[in-house]
Image (cartoon, grey):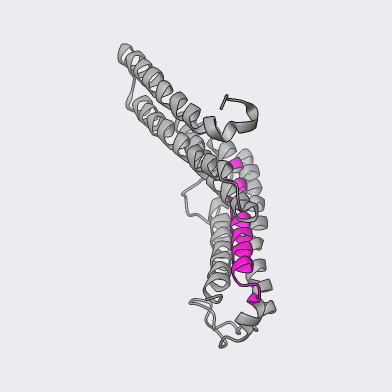
Amino acid sequence: MPCTCGNWRRWIRPLVVLLYIVGLLVVVPLCVWELQKLEVGIHTKAWFIAGIFLLMTIPISLWGILQHLVHYTQPELQKPIIRILWMVPIYSLDSWIALKYPNIAIYVDTCRECYEAYVIYNFMVFLSNYLTNRYPNLVLIIEAKDQQRHLPPLCCCPSWAMGEVLLFRCKLGVLQYTVVRPFTTIIALICELVGVYDEGNFSFNNAWTYLVILNNMSQLVSITGVSFCFSKSY
């Protein structure tokens, strides 16, 4: 069968593998040769080594995404999975750029963290679609289960009603992080511009301290929501 746009699923994977191998055989030796000609410091060598891992990480991630596109049989499940898989190349590229240009790390981290919130949202969508497809009567199943208490350290909080209320509050607990994270990220960027943000420095005069506490509290609530949503469905 000739290679046409209509049957791209037959030839796209061999083409991607071929381009990846050719790229490694050409780019890596060329970069090593150029690096040997220059007297560079430890930071540049570390950045170069990170670049090699980047060349390995991104194609592997894209291969997983491509596999889902080729075998796109469950769109309601595979669509959020593909969005989640994009997190790997985004994180890798962000780390590589930040290692080379530390002064702009806060800006690329802002984009990465906003996408991280989007990934959490898609993970919630995936769980919801998966449980709904597997258990059409999910609400009734949860209502029939015994009352469950919150996990530590939230065990002192009053228990949620089982059934539809539980599902709604679990989703709300997860989705609040998708709002809090971009908000704190933008605040961190503003604080960096005005000179009151110093990452890693726990100080009452440092905005990073308060943003970390807020993010951790939001993450705790989000993880609790995921745990309840998934574990109480079985």
Above or below, 35 relative to 108:
above
Asked which quadrant contains residue 136, the reply is bottom right
The percent coordinates of residue 107 (x first, y second) are 59, 37
Image position, residue 194 (x, y; %):
64, 40
Relative to residue 31, is residue 188 depicted above or below? Answer: below
The residue at 59%/63% (across/down) is: 130
Q: Is residue 205 visible?
A: yes
- For residue 134, above or below residue 94: below
Q: Is residue 38 left or right of residue 157?
A: left
Between 112 and 105, the one lying in front of the other is: 112
189 relative to 40 in the view: left or right: right
Q: Look at the image and tell me whether residue 195 can be seen.
A: no
Front residue (pair 116, 74): 74
The residue located at (47%, 50%) in the rendering is 201
Q: Nearer the viewer, residue 221 or 29?
A: 29
Q: Residue at x 64, y 68 (%)?
A: 132
Q: Magenta span: helix, strand or loop, mainly?
A: helix
In percent of width and height, residue 156 lies at 54, 83
Task: Tell me where residue 58 appears, x and y as whole percent.
Answer: 47, 35
Disc tally is: 0
Q: Residue furthest top?
A: 37
- What span is in magenta? 111-138
Q: Which residue lies at the image location 62% right of the left edge and 26% below the top edge?
A: 4
| Membership of 178 in magenta stretch | no
Work out which quarter of the rendered image holds the N terminus and state it: top right
